[in-house]
């Protein structure tokens, strides 16, 4: 019966751990749900959905509390030393002694600290701190925080696993010492001269107290590491400027020109087009006479936004690529060689029978935010 109880409790602990991790993942995904807000002129902004954010925050920290509670109550499980250590031994493919496990745990703790330090030293948020408060001449690093975050998370996992192994070895050592102490007390009761046994018992009791203190310290450290990690390494709630990322586009808000738009993060080199208007018998013609860009502009990069001031007709924004093959919503992009790119001499044809004379046309990116040029047909 005892074995079945231990197995049941072990399975319950594993399920609790899986539940905690699942709650954290689901909570994080819920927190990242955004509302798309139309700000006019075909521009949009992304804002967190308050209901999903608060619900996700509750679920996220519920998972954190479950994991912390599991750590706090771990020594109450009678199979901690008997079942979990063999599992760890199987993972390592070797049957180490208890003292070897303690040494392995210590080594993993040191490795975890080193990996975490490397991640922090090479991270953009440390560079941001240096450039903001110590050496402003360095300038802000315009790089993603993801590589450093992965290294830090890996270091934290190794660190916690090292503490876990050391904790299990202490649990096992405590049980062996408790058994030895009980045997010593029995011997001292049977022997008429039990001074040596009494001294051994006193020494064992002191060692037992030291083990209990070490266990409490390790449990506290694991909980502190978990709490720090789940708060500071979560881009949505992190108080660290170099990590906090409202739109989860991998660039912290402090270096993100568009902190609420996951599609954009840096202000790219400007593209500007100079337009000239003409006409033929059937169309108004808008001819591209000059292009200022640092790269060859793809027809997918630019959309035409048209306003018919006379009839109040405003078709949806269409990219040059969409209207390059034929007329669509009364617009057609006449693409010249090389095809697929915007060139000097390319034309935008607007059907006269679809639009009045008073037209305004704006060339923007697919989001409607970045402006490339405009003209008016009077």
Image (tube, rainbow, N blue to C red):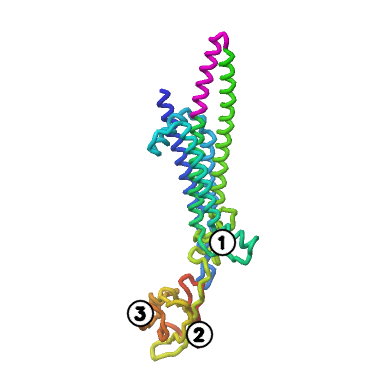
- Mark 2: few, some, or many residues within 10 Å (few <14, many ≥20)? some
Query: In x, y percent, where is residue 311?
Result: 48, 81
Give the farthest residue toward the right: 133
Q: Which residue is painted at 49% across and 45% down in the image? A: 157
Labels 3 and 2 touching (C-beta < 8 A)? no
- In front: label 3 or label 2: 3
Q: Which mark is residue 342?
A: none
Label 2: state its secondary structure.
strand
In the image, is residue 92 above or below residue 268? above
State the residue position of label 2.
Answer: 376
Mark earlier in primary sequence (1, 3): 1
Q: Quadrant of the N terminus?
A: top left
Mark earlier in primary sequence (3, 2): 3
Marks 3/2: CA distance? 26 Å
State the residue position of label 1.
Answer: 253
Judged left or right of residue 53, residue 343 is left
Nearest the viewer among 228 and 285 is: 228
Magenta-drawn stretch contains 106: no
- In front: label 1 or label 2: 1
Start-end of magenta stretch? 172-193
Query: In x, y percent, where is residue 26?
Result: 47, 48
Marks 1/2: CA distance? 37 Å
Query: In x, y percent, where is residue 330?
Result: 40, 80
State which quadrant residue 260 falls in.
bottom right
Marks 1/3: CA distance? 38 Å
State the residue position of label 3.
Answer: 339
């Amino acid at each position: 019966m005892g074995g079945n109880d231990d197995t049941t409790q072990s399975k319950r602990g594993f399920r609790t751990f899986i539940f905690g991790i699942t709650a954290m993942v689901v909570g994080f995904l819920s927190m990242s749900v955004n509302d798309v807000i139309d700000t006019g002129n075909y521009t949009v902004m992304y804002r967190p959905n308050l209901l999903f954010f608060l619900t996700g925050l509750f679920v996220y920290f519920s998972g954190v509390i479950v994991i912390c509670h599991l750590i706090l109550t771990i020594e109450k499980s009678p199979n901690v030393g008997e079942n979990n250590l063999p599992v760890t031994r199987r993972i390592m493919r070797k049957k180490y002694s208890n003292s070897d496990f303690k040494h392995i745990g210590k080594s993993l703790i040191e490795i975890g600290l080193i990996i975490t330090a490397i991640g922090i030293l090479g991270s953009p948020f440390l560079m941001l701190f240096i450039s903001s408060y110590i050496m402003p001449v360095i300038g802000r690093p315009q790089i993603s925080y993801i590589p450093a975050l992965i290294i830090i998370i890996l270091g934290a996992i190794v660190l916690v696993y090292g503490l876990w192994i050391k904790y299990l070895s202490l649990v096992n050592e405590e049980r062996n010492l408790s058994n030895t102490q009980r045997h010593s007390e029995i011997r001292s009761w049977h022997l008429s001269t039990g001074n040596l046994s009494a001294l051994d018992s006193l020494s064992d009791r002191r060692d037992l107290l030291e083990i209990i203190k070490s266990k409490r310290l390790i449990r506290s450290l694991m909980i502190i590491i978990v709490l720090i990690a789940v708060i500071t390494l979560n881009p949505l709630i992190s108080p660290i400027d170099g990590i906090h990322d409202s739109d989860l586009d991998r660039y912290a808000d402090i270096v993100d020109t568009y902190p609420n738009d996951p599609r954009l993060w840096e202000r790219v080199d400007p593209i500007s087009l100079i337009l000239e208007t003409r006409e033929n018998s059937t169309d108004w013609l808008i001819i591209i006479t000059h292009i200022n860009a640092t790269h060859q502009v793809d027809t997918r990069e630019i959309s035409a936004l048209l306003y018919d001031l006379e009839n109040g007709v405003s078709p949806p924004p269409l990219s040059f690529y969409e209207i390059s093959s034929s007329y669509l919503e009364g617009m057609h992009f006449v693409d010249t060689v090389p095809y697929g790119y915007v060139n000097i001499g390319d034309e935008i044809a607007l059907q006269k029978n679809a639009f009045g004379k008073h037209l305004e046309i704006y060339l923007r990116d697919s989001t409607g935010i970045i402006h490339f040029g405009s003209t008016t047909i009077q």
